[in-house]
Image (cartoon, rainbow, N blue to C red):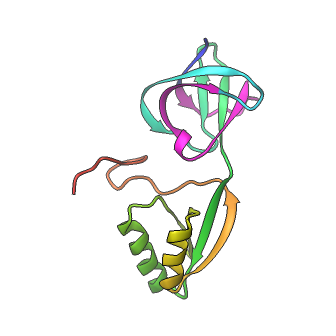
Amino acid sequence: MIRATRTTHSHDIPAGIVTLNYDDRFRRRIVMTCDNGFEFMLDLPKVIELRDGDDLLLDDGRHVRVRAAAESLMRATATDPHHLIRTAWHVGNRHLPCEIHADHLILRFDHVIAEMLKKLGADVEKLDGPFNPEGGAYGQGRTHSHEH
Protein backbone atom coordinates (compact mmCIF):
# COMPACT_ATOMS: atom_id res chain seq x y z
CA MET A 1 0.00 0.00 0.00
CA ILE A 2 1.27 3.46 -0.85
CA ARG A 3 2.32 5.53 2.17
CA ALA A 4 2.17 9.19 3.14
CA THR A 5 5.25 9.92 5.23
CA ARG A 6 5.21 13.69 5.74
CA THR A 7 3.15 16.80 5.35
CA THR A 8 3.80 19.37 2.66
CA HIS A 9 2.04 22.17 0.80
CA SER A 10 1.30 21.91 -2.89
CA HIS A 11 -0.59 23.82 -5.53
CA ASP A 12 -0.83 20.72 -7.74
CA ILE A 13 -4.08 18.82 -8.08
CA PRO A 14 -4.17 16.20 -5.29
CA ALA A 15 -4.55 12.45 -5.85
CA GLY A 16 -7.46 12.69 -3.44
CA ILE A 17 -8.99 14.62 -0.59
CA VAL A 18 -9.40 13.05 2.82
CA THR A 19 -12.15 14.71 4.87
CA LEU A 20 -11.57 14.28 8.60
CA ASN A 21 -13.21 15.55 11.77
CA TYR A 22 -11.17 17.17 14.54
CA ASP A 23 -10.42 13.89 16.36
CA ASP A 24 -9.34 12.11 13.18
CA ARG A 25 -6.89 14.91 12.32
CA PHE A 26 -4.57 13.94 15.20
CA ARG A 27 -2.80 10.88 13.83
CA ARG A 28 0.50 9.15 13.17
CA ARG A 29 -0.26 5.81 11.52
CA ILE A 30 -3.56 4.60 10.07
CA VAL A 31 -5.05 3.49 6.75
CA MET A 32 -7.08 6.34 5.30
CA THR A 33 -9.61 6.45 2.48
CA CYS A 34 -10.04 9.58 0.39
CA ASP A 35 -13.43 10.90 -0.62
CA ASN A 36 -12.82 9.42 -4.12
CA GLY A 37 -12.06 5.92 -2.67
CA PHE A 38 -8.25 6.14 -2.98
CA GLU A 39 -6.60 4.37 -0.01
CA PHE A 40 -3.20 5.05 1.51
CA MET A 41 -1.30 4.43 4.72
CA LEU A 42 -0.60 7.50 6.82
CA ASP A 43 2.81 6.67 8.28
CA LEU A 44 4.29 9.75 9.94
CA PRO A 45 7.35 9.73 12.24
CA LYS A 46 5.29 11.17 15.12
CA VAL A 47 1.72 12.14 15.96
CA ILE A 48 0.83 15.52 14.52
CA GLU A 49 -2.27 17.59 14.09
CA LEU A 50 -3.38 17.65 10.47
CA ARG A 51 -4.84 21.04 9.62
CA ASP A 52 -7.37 21.91 6.96
CA GLY A 53 -5.42 22.47 3.71
CA ASP A 54 -2.38 20.39 4.69
CA ASP A 55 -1.07 18.02 2.03
CA LEU A 56 0.24 14.53 2.76
CA LEU A 57 3.18 13.55 0.54
CA LEU A 58 2.87 10.05 -0.93
CA ASP A 59 5.81 7.74 -1.71
CA ASP A 60 5.32 8.28 -5.45
CA GLY A 61 5.46 12.11 -5.23
CA ARG A 62 1.72 12.73 -5.44
CA HIS A 63 -0.14 14.21 -2.49
CA VAL A 64 -3.46 13.97 -0.68
CA ARG A 65 -5.14 17.10 0.66
CA VAL A 66 -6.64 17.21 4.16
CA ARG A 67 -10.06 18.80 4.53
CA ALA A 68 -11.67 19.53 7.89
CA ALA A 69 -15.11 17.93 8.06
CA ALA A 70 -18.17 19.89 9.08
CA GLU A 71 -19.06 19.16 12.70
CA SER A 72 -21.84 20.12 15.08
CA LEU A 73 -20.55 23.28 16.76
CA MET A 74 -21.73 26.24 18.78
CA ARG A 75 -20.75 29.90 18.72
CA ALA A 76 -20.71 31.75 22.03
CA THR A 77 -20.82 35.54 21.94
CA ALA A 78 -20.48 37.83 24.93
CA THR A 79 -21.66 41.30 25.84
CA ASP A 80 -18.17 42.87 25.82
CA PRO A 81 -14.46 41.88 25.72
CA HIS A 82 -14.25 41.36 29.50
CA HIS A 83 -17.29 39.07 29.42
CA LEU A 84 -15.70 37.10 26.54
CA ILE A 85 -12.50 36.67 28.58
CA ARG A 86 -14.49 35.41 31.59
CA THR A 87 -16.42 33.02 29.35
CA ALA A 88 -13.19 31.74 27.76
CA TRP A 89 -11.72 31.20 31.25
CA HIS A 90 -14.65 28.94 32.19
CA VAL A 91 -14.27 26.99 28.93
CA GLY A 92 -10.51 26.60 29.52
CA ASN A 93 -11.11 25.54 33.12
CA ARG A 94 -12.99 22.56 31.69
CA HIS A 95 -10.12 21.76 29.29
CA LEU A 96 -12.40 22.03 26.26
CA PRO A 97 -10.96 22.54 22.78
CA CYS A 98 -11.99 26.00 21.64
CA GLU A 99 -11.51 28.40 18.74
CA ILE A 100 -10.92 31.88 20.10
CA HIS A 101 -11.95 34.81 17.91
CA ALA A 102 -11.97 38.55 18.64
CA ASP A 103 -15.70 38.59 19.40
CA HIS A 104 -16.76 34.96 19.91
CA LEU A 105 -15.75 31.41 20.83
CA ILE A 106 -16.41 28.26 18.79
CA LEU A 107 -16.79 24.92 20.59
CA ARG A 108 -18.15 21.50 19.77
CA PHE A 109 -21.85 21.41 20.46
CA ASP A 110 -22.64 20.02 23.90
CA HIS A 111 -25.99 20.79 25.50
CA VAL A 112 -24.51 20.83 29.03
CA ILE A 113 -21.78 23.31 28.05
CA ALA A 114 -24.32 25.37 26.08
CA GLU A 115 -26.41 25.71 29.27
CA MET A 116 -23.32 26.69 31.27
CA LEU A 117 -22.46 29.38 28.69
CA LYS A 118 -26.03 30.72 28.78
CA LYS A 119 -25.93 30.87 32.59
CA LEU A 120 -22.73 32.89 32.25
CA GLY A 121 -24.70 35.36 30.10
CA ALA A 122 -23.37 34.33 26.68
CA ASP A 123 -25.55 33.99 23.61
CA VAL A 124 -25.17 30.49 22.11
CA GLU A 125 -25.91 29.65 18.49
CA LYS A 126 -25.72 26.12 17.06
CA LEU A 127 -23.95 25.75 13.69
CA ASP A 128 -22.14 23.25 11.49
CA GLY A 129 -18.65 23.78 10.14
CA PRO A 130 -14.99 22.79 10.35
CA PHE A 131 -13.48 22.87 13.85
CA ASN A 132 -9.96 24.29 14.24
CA PRO A 133 -9.36 25.00 17.93
CA GLU A 134 -6.29 26.56 19.52
CA GLY A 135 -3.20 24.39 19.97
CA GLY A 136 -1.50 23.55 23.24
CA ALA A 137 0.14 26.10 25.51
CA TYR A 138 3.57 24.46 25.44
CA GLY A 139 4.05 24.04 21.71
CA GLN A 140 2.20 23.57 18.49
CA GLY A 141 -0.65 21.14 18.18
CA ARG A 142 -2.64 19.44 20.87
CA THR A 143 -1.60 18.63 24.38
CA HIS A 144 -2.93 15.88 26.57
CA SER A 145 -1.91 13.75 29.53
CA HIS A 146 -0.27 16.71 31.17
CA GLU A 147 0.41 17.15 34.87
CA HIS A 148 -0.98 19.93 37.05
Q: Which residue is found at the position 64% from the left and 17% from the top?
A: 61
Q: Position of residue 19 (x, y in %)?
A: 67, 39
Q: Where is residue 147 drawn, in percent x and y?
A: 22, 52
Name the foreground residue: 112 vs 137: 112
- Residue 103 lies, in percent from the top left, at 57, 76
Q: Residue at x 61, y 13 (%)?
A: 2
Q: Among all residues in the image, which is located at the extreme front?
A: 112
Q: Is residue 10 above or below residue 122?
A: above
Quarter the C terminus occupies? bottom left
> Considering only vertical position in the picture, is 74 above or below 121?
above
Spot occupied by residue 113 in the image (x, y as percentages of width and height): 50, 70
Determine if the magenta segment contains residue 20. yes
| Total numbered labels | 0
* Residue 13 lies in the magenta stretch: yes
What residue span does the magenta drawing correspond to? 6-32
Residue 101 lies in quadrant: bottom right
Image height of 83 relative to 56, above or below: below
